[in-house]
Amino acid sequence: MPTLGTRPEDVTDPKASATWRPLGWGYTLLMNLGPAAIAFCAVLALAPLMARLGLPRYFSMTVAEALVLTPIELGLLLRPRTTPPAAGRCGRCRPCWPTAGRSPAG
């Protein structure tokens, strides 16, 4: 059982280490704040429509969550895994994916 101090780089199983790769700050922020920003824009766009229909403006948050945020989050969670780059490198100084059964170089 892994402990809290275990890091993915310390894994000796090539299959396990091949599935993990670090994310950059930009990608991490995009994955965390992007869906919320899109949902916020949907709330702002739906608020006048809710008022025109005689519903409370806060109801636009419920509609945006159901029709905008939920499909985005499900799409991010259920998307297929990315395939390894053609050359076995992601553009950084060390290989991210093992190629032809070789273990990744550290």
Image: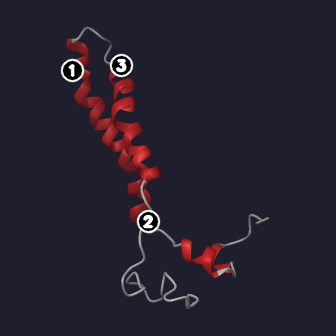
Q: Are marks 3 and 2 in contact (CB under 8 Å)?
A: no
Q: Which mark is residue 25?
A: 2
Q: Residue at x 40, y 81 (%)?
A: 90
Residue 17 lies left or right of residue 38; in this view the side is right
Residue 11 higher or lower than 42, as above or below: below
Q: Looking at the image, which is closer to me, 106 or 79?
A: 79
User: Outermost residue toward the top?
Assistant: 54
Q: Residue at x 49, y 81 (%)?
A: 97
Q: How is the image coloured?
A: secondary structure
- Regarding mark 3 in the picture, which secondary structure is present there? helix
- Regarding mark 2 in the picture, which secondary structure is present there? helix
Residue 103 higher or lower than 78, as above or below: below
- Regarding mark 1 in the picture, which secondary structure is present there? helix
Q: CA distance from mark 2 to mark 1?
A: 35 Å
Q: Which mark is residue 48?
A: 1
User: Would you name the residue on which mark 3 appears?
Assistant: 59
Q: Amino acid at mark 1?
A: Pro
3 or 2: mark nearer the eye: 3
Q: Can you tell which quarter of the image residue 30 is in?
A: bottom left
Q: Earlier in the sequence, mark 1 or mark 3?
A: 1
Callout 3 crowding tier (Cα within 10 Å): few <14, some 14–19, many ≥20: some
Q: Which mark is residue 11?
A: none
Residue 32 higher or lower than 101, as above or below: above
Residue 52 lies left or right of residue 77; in this view the side is left
The quarter of the picture where the C terminus appears is: bottom right
x and y, in percent, of residue 72 in the image: 37, 44
x and y, in percent, of residue 44 in the image: 26, 30
Q: CA distance from mark 1 to mark 3?
A: 11 Å
Q: Is residue 58 visible?
A: no
x and y, in percent, of residue 20 in the image: 55, 71
Q: Earlier in the sequence, mark 2 or mark 1?
A: 2
